[in-house]
Each structure stands twice: as structure tokens, then as C-alpha cells.
Amino acid sequence: MSRGVVGRVCDAIAAWSNRSEVNHVLGDVHYMAWFLPRKRTVLTVLDCVTLERLTGWRRRIFWLLWYWWPLRRCDHVTVISTYSGESLRRWVSVRPERIHVIPPPLSSEFKPAPPGPRVGKTRLLQVGTAPNKNLPRVLEAIQGLPVLLVIVGEPDAAILARIDELGVESEIHGALSREDLLEQYRLSDFIIFASTYEGFGLPIIEAQAVGRPVIAGDVCAMPEAAGGAACMVDPFRVEAIRAGIVRLLEDSDYADTLVKRGFENARRYAPERIAGEYAEVYRLAAGCETGKADDRFTA
């Protein structure tokens, strides 16, 4: 991803020079669609969180260059959740029939892994340290509970100081490889994902696929991702997060039920199924009749 106006214009021109029968722009590079052919371009919008955080002229410029103009340059838009689609339509006028909800696929490496015998404190896995991951409230919620908070990410100095201040026992891992991250899921007892904002919430279904109970924020797209198979809590209330953790610690039947439901929910995100949904959108963009075989767009 380039920086600055000139670099991004060059990227957009390069995309035009390499245009194909169907062009798919995804990730935080919406500007790549600036010059692509409208009828044969698909744009994926993950969320609108940056628009919601910016103010004034910065928001206006970002809205114009990252959303309004790119959306005028494509006939088909994919979003990773119904919530993201609704958010997008609040910011930009897009006809509903142009929006296709296609969630992210679950990598096939995330498979059921029976938990080992619990030794010592319960391992509570927290994936991510960005502000929306809500670590300050999570730390307050677990103060005094018999848990070890395993953090994947790099907490800032304020978070590290808060860990010491509250006396929370923690184990911190920086950036991990896919295999090392998967190992942390396997080693965990529960997953805490009490975010305040998510366009989807992939760690929820990754944990479900491995077979771990999940505590998730009951806002944005997380209830949609969890599919009724997680302990949903108000992420803005410390006491609600704590109550969710305590319930999983004390009610093993409830935790087992979440695991069983989680396996069922995770199957909805099988890569083959998601690929098939994208293939249908590509057929639409190519002007093909959907539902019929086409070797160019086969999952």
C-alpha cells in the first residue's frame, strides 16, 4: 500500500494498466478502483471505522477518495458482515442489490483440538491490543480472578503499567506466526474478545473451530459472527465482562454448550463455501448468468 497522494495515484494507474476481465479490490486500498472499469470491478469494504473516527475536513477527504469515488467505479460491493453493509449505506448511498455479504473464510488449519488438563490458573486468551480490543476494561474485569491473561500483540506502556497496577498475571506475546497463534488457541481455556468495534471478528470463529468457549462483545458485527455460540457481554461495562468470565469459570455445562454450538457455527465459514459465494459475484461482474457452470469462476 503506497503512502501519499502521488503514490496512490500511481497505484490506481497501475491497476488500470493491469485491468482484467474481472477486477477485485480488497483491503484498505479502495483507491485502486479509481480508474477501473465500473461494470467489471468488485470492491470489498471491510468496515467504516476510519470514517467514524475522523472529523472535519479529514473525514470529508477520506470519504471522497476512499468511499464515494471508488464506489462509483464498481457495480458490485462485497462486505464482510451485514453490520458492515449497513454501516456503509449510512455513509454512502449504495443500492442494496449492489451489496453482497460475504464473510471472511476460516482457514482450514483451525481444527478441533481437545484441551489439555488444566494446571494452575485458567488461560484466558486475548487476541489484539488495538484500542477497540478494549484491554483496559478487560484488565479491570479480571482483577482478582484466578486467570492468566495471555495477550497476543504488543501492549503500549499505559497498558503495561495498568497490568502492574491491578496485579493481573499476564503472559505477553508479540507478533506471532500463524502456527504460533494457532498454538495459543490450543493452549487456551477460554477466549476473551470483548471488543468495542469489529467489522466482523475473526478470532471468534477461529476459537470456535478449535473448540474453545468465547466471550465476545455484544455490539457491531460480533453477534452476527458468533452465531449464538458465544457468551455475549456489554463491552462498555466492566461488570458485564467480569460476569461473563465468572460464568464460564463456574458453569462447565454452559461452557461445553458453547463449544458444541461453536463447532456448528464455524462450519458456516468453510473456505469452499466462501469461495463459491465470491465466484457468483465474479460471474455477475463478468456479465455471466449466475448459477451456471463457468470454468473461469469456479470455487
Image (cartoon, rainbow, N blue to C red):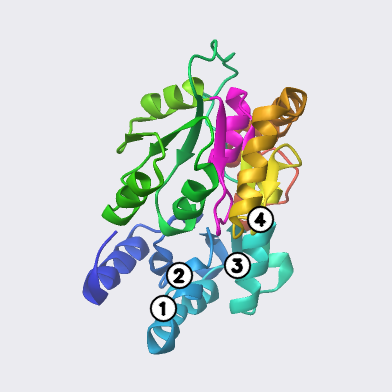
Q: Where on the picture, by quarter, is residue 9? A: bottom left
Q: Are marks 3 and 2 in contact (CB under 8 Å)?
A: no
Q: Which residue is mark 2?
A: 50
**Residue 199 % position (x, y):** 57, 56
Q: Is residue 119 above or below residue 178?
A: above
Looking at the rendering, in which quadrant would you find the C terminus? Answer: top right
Residue at far top of view: 117
Q: Which of disc 2 and disc 3 is earlier in sequence?
A: 2
39 left or right, relative to 169: right
Q: Residues within 10 Å of mark 2 (few under 14, many from 20)?
A: few
- What type is the residue that disc 2 sits on? Thr
Q: Are marks 1 and 2 in contact (CB under 8 Å)?
A: yes
Badge nearest the viewer, 3 or 4:
4
Q: Which of disc 2 and disc 4 is earlier in sequence?
A: 2
Q: Is residue 253 above or below residue 49?
A: above
| Label 3, label 1: how far apart the Cα atoms are | 21 Å
| Label 4, label 2: how far apart the Cα atoms are | 22 Å
Q: Which residue is mark 3?
A: 75
Q: Is residue 176 above or below residue 219?
A: above
Q: Which residue is mark 1?
A: 62
